[in-house]
Amino acid sequence: MAVTIQQIADACGLAKSTVKNILSSQGGAYSEQTRQRVLEAAKRCGYEPSRLGRHFRSRRLPAVGVLAPELTDPFAAELLDGLTRRLAAMDLEVMVGLPLDSSAGATGERLRSFLSWRLGGLVIVGYGPEAIGREDLERAMGSTAVVTVADEAWPSCSTVHGDRQAAARLAVEHLQTLGHQRIGLLADDNEKTRLVREELERVGSELGDRDIVGKADADADGWFDLGKRFAVAPDRPSAVFAWSPPAAGRFAAGFLAEGGRIPADLSIVVHSRTRTDEAAGLPLTAAGAPVDRLAEATVDLLQRAMAAQKADGPFAEQVRVEPELIVRRSSGRSPVQVPAEPPTARPEPRTEKIRSLLAAQWTDKQRKRE
């Protein structure tokens, strides 16, 4: 059974109202000795203060909701880990909501369920602005502090985001310094393909359509089989950039299974910065915003949004986390050798003849001296 205020009052010999005020921090002119007396009695009785009581007073649950499409993605799981640890330091619990399916209706239903709990804040992870209905988003922003973590900034809503263009630039520049002149891409998304194509054109290269490896349904067998076929292709890039680490891992497994070598035959760079990139069987070179820094920026922004919410003021701020490049074992020098400088042209026959005559004259002079 739960320990009651009356039991603690009986244990320390004080009035119930005194014990209640001290345990709920509601004020009162009590000496430090009296406070310690109540706290020690509560500890002996095994009393745990009800956080619901604080909720009833503030009309907000001391918790933050995290709405995400899934947690099987290493990025989402690692971000949730970082958010939970930082919010716990602020004495805030985390409630995770996953829609029953990927439809906009299911996402909106989960969002409205969160709002019914009167949460202290809400973090929306991995969605674009089109995935959340306008009315649902406005209702959420009107009732609690809302921060999104996305690829790009949301209009009129606080967002923490990376810089995909800069990440693609880091990957392209890294591969070019290793001598790779022909760089391919693992992608199905037209917008992401455009970003890589622009970066290659910026450095005087190009992304040919034949060098884009994509599969609409990126299941394990699909990317694995694509990797196997890539390994035996007679004409292929010496390096690839991948937007999806799971797809890159499966593609690499297929490439290795068919006898290919990484990075001796093929270099791979992924757009990511999670701990799983390093812990993989083949540690992947990665370019992207570190997930730990994204989590830190999200909690900092959420605190500012919560303060603005209490002050009933409008708040919308965009925070960009710059990408970093971490070089690991999946990238190396290009196996394609740059042609050597052409040999120096042989002297003309007339020049050769003059040199032979001069050499003969010098030899005759040496003999006469002897």
Image: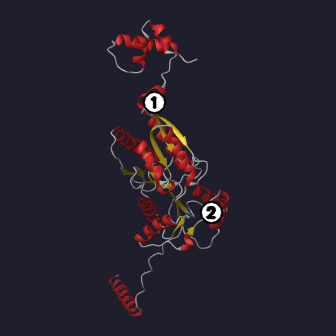
Q: Nearer the viewer, residue 160 or 30?
A: 30
Q: Is residue 326 visible?
A: no
Going by the numbered disc 2, the residue's amino acid type is Gly
Q: Which mark is residue 246?
A: none
Pointer 2 residue? 260
Residue named by callout 1: 55
Q: Calculate the distance from the C-alpha at mark 2 to the C-alpha at mark 1.
A: 59 Å
Disc 1 secondary structure class: helix
Residue under the point 45% across and 64% down: 172
x and y percentages locating residue 96 in the rendered image? 54, 41
Measured along the vertical axis of the image, is residue 294 above or below residue 182?
A: above
Image quarter of the C terminus? bottom left
Residue 265 versus residue 46 in the image, above or below: below
Sequence-first disc among 2 and 1: 1
Residue 280, image x, y percentages: 57, 49
> Would residue 207 be seen by someone viewing this image from the given angle?
yes
Camera-nearest label, 2 or 1: 1
